[in-house]
Image (cartoon, rainbow, N blue to C red):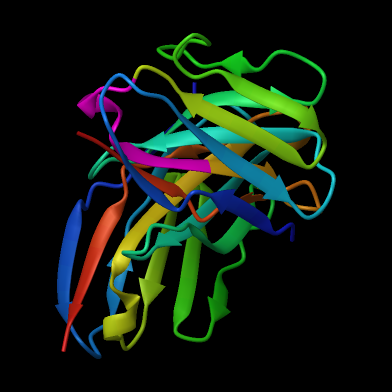
């Protein structure tokens, strides 16, 4: 069975602070995919990143960066110099081989509040 | 990535009635997924809908309560039947991305049952 844990249910920071959202996962599959999604107050899910289990390189996209460590089964997400527009719920998710019809397992989400 | 049009975006419904949610995709997709997100909660998969076959429901969800149609490769509907206030949630449809390794979501339907 797959499981995704986001231990931080809610984080509050002041604008321009850096913030890291934690994600720990469990799976027995050797091939799997990890995702981060952003859900702003409007409710839609915005895709941020996908990472497969064979690629442990960290990734940076503007103010966003992701740290994938298989040794600790973690896929953490850092926002540098946070902005009010970053306020949202962020979900980490896991999928085994999608070509086998596997679907996403979501973590509980972390609500990030960035205050001006 | 596929673009999904989901309707309605929100609705307020009386208990005991039913609501049908539609998802239209701009490309043909084999599998479509329906999720429920209860207030303050994460997303839970309701069912997987393949064209031309019965939907596959996850534990805790039944066809009588959440009938799904998948008439072609670009369209699906989810009906929430005989609604109660506990059905108040955001409902989202999803498809796999074109490269097969990710998922795109509709904009969601925010349902309130009174």
Residue A65 x, y percent position in the rendering:
48, 74
**Residue at the (54%, 53%) spot, across then down:** A35
The vertical placement of B110 against B36, above or below, is below
Residue depicted at 41% across the width and 65% down the height: A77
Q: Is residue B29 above or below residue B31?
A: below
Position of A88 with respect to B47 (left or right) is left
Relative depth, front residue between A90 and A63: A90
A49 with respect to B1 (left or right): left
**In the image, B29: left or right of A15?**
right
Q: Quadrant of residue A61?
A: bottom right
* Residue nearer the viewer, B50 or A89: B50
Q: Quadrant of residue A76?
A: bottom left
The image shows residue A66 at horizontal and vertical percentages of 48, 67
The range drawn in magenta is B83-92
Identify whether B48 is placed above or below A62. Answer: above
Q: Is residue B50 magenta?
A: no
Find residue A99 and report its horizontal and vertical position in percent.
Answer: 78, 34
């Amino acid at each position: 069975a797959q499981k995704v844990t986001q231990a931080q249910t809610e984080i509050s920071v002041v604008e321009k602070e850096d913030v890291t959202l934690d994600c720990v996962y469990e799976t027995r599959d050797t091939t799997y995919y990890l995702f981060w999604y952003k859900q702003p107050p409007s409710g839609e899910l915005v895709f941020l990143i996908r990472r497969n289990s064979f690629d442990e390189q960290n990734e940076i996209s503007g103010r966003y960066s992701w740290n994938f460590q298989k040794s600790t089964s973690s896929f953490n997400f850092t926002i540098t110099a946070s902005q009010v527009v970053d306020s949202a719920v962020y979900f980490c998710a896991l999928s085994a081989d999608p070509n086998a019809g596997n679907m996403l397992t979501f973590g509980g989400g972390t609500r990030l509040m960035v205050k001006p | 990535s596929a673009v999904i049009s989901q309707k309605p975006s929100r609705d307020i419904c009386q208990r005991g009635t039913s609501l049908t949610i539609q998802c239209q995709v701009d490309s043909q997709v084999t599998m479509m997924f329906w999720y429920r997100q209860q207030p303050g909660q994460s997303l839970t998969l309701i069912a997987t809908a393949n064209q031309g076959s019965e939907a596959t429901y996850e534990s805790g969800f039944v066809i009588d309560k959440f009938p799904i149609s998948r008439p072609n490769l670009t369209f699906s509907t989810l009906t929430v039947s005989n609604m109660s206030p506990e059905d108040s949630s955001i409902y989202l449809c999803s498809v796999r991305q074109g490269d097969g390794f990710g998922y795109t979501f509709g904009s969601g339907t925010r349902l309130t049952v009174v």
